[in-house]
Image (cartoon, rainbow, N blue to C red):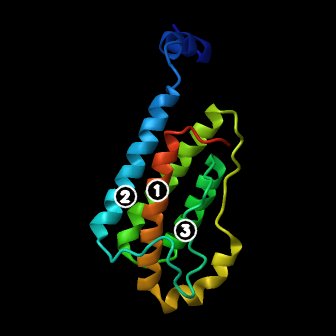
Amino acid sequence: MLCGPLCRFLWLWPYLSYVEAVPIRKVQDDTKTLIKTIVTRINDISHTSVSSKQRVAGLDFIPGLHPVLSLSKMDQTLAIYQQILTGLPSRNVVQISNDLENLRDLLHLLASSKNCPLPRARGPETLESLGGALEASLYSTEVVALSRLQASLQDMLWRLDLSPGC
């Protein structure tokens, strides 16, 4: 008997009908777990810590803490950090950069569950012109970026419990 595409589809139908959407609570828990994992990775690198409020000359483009963090602001902040980390030659930050991409995907899932259209944020174009500044102070940039990223992630972790807005 020849079984065409319709026959194959009918054979798969019972399996397809049992597929359930991932509960949003699971996505939120996965988001928190990934944030904790990234913070642990940053701790394992063990650079000297820099206060997120401390200003370092020439590195003002690295974001600090924001008073109000909505999901879109979280995504924008993570996009900036991801762009900074991608520009660093250190192998220590490659996995963290990949984790930030995954975290941004989870934030988009959370936003879509709240009917918040989050456009894919990019880091500001000003970072592209900072190639010389990054090359001149790679170690300082890495230390400051990781320290501020860690503080931002811990703040995001806390704010996720408060169910942030769009």
Q: Is residue 124 above or below residue 17?
A: below
Crowd around label 2: few <14 · some 14–19 · many ≥20 (10 Å): many
For disc 1, the marked residue is 153
Q: Position of residue 82 (x, y in %)?
A: 53, 65
Name the residue located 53 percent from the left edge and 80 percent from the top edge: 55
Q: In this figure, what is the number of numbered marks?
A: 3
Residue 126: numbered disc: none
Relative to 45, 8 lies left or right: right
Q: Nearer the viewer, residue 135 or 2?
A: 135
Crowd around label 3: few <14 · some 14–19 · many ≥20 (10 Å): many
How far is the residue under mark 2 from the one under mark 1? Answer: 7 Å
Q: Quadrant of the C terminus?
A: top right
Name the residue located 69 percent from the left edge and 77 percent from the top edge: 126
Earlier sequence position, callout 1 versus callout 3:
3
Q: Are marks 2 and 1 in contact (CB under 8 Å)?
A: yes
Q: Is residue 120 visible?
A: yes
Earlier sequence position, callout 2 versus callout 3:
2
Q: Quadrant of residue 4?
A: top right
Earlier sequence position, callout 2 versus callout 1:
2
For disc 3, the marked residue is 64
Q: Is residue 111 above or below residue 122?
A: above
Q: Nearer the viewer, residue 92 or 49?
A: 49
Type of the residue with mark 2: Val
Q: Position of residue 64 (x, y in %)?
A: 55, 68
Instruction: Check disc 1 and report its element: helix, strand or loop.
Output: helix
Q: Position of residue 123 (x, y in %)?
A: 64, 66
Q: Position of residue 79 (x, y in %)?
A: 59, 61
Relative to 120, 143 lies left or right: left
Name the residue located 55 percent from the left edge and 63 percent from the top edge: 65
For disc 2, the marked residue is 39
Q: Is residue 155 above or below residue 133?
A: above
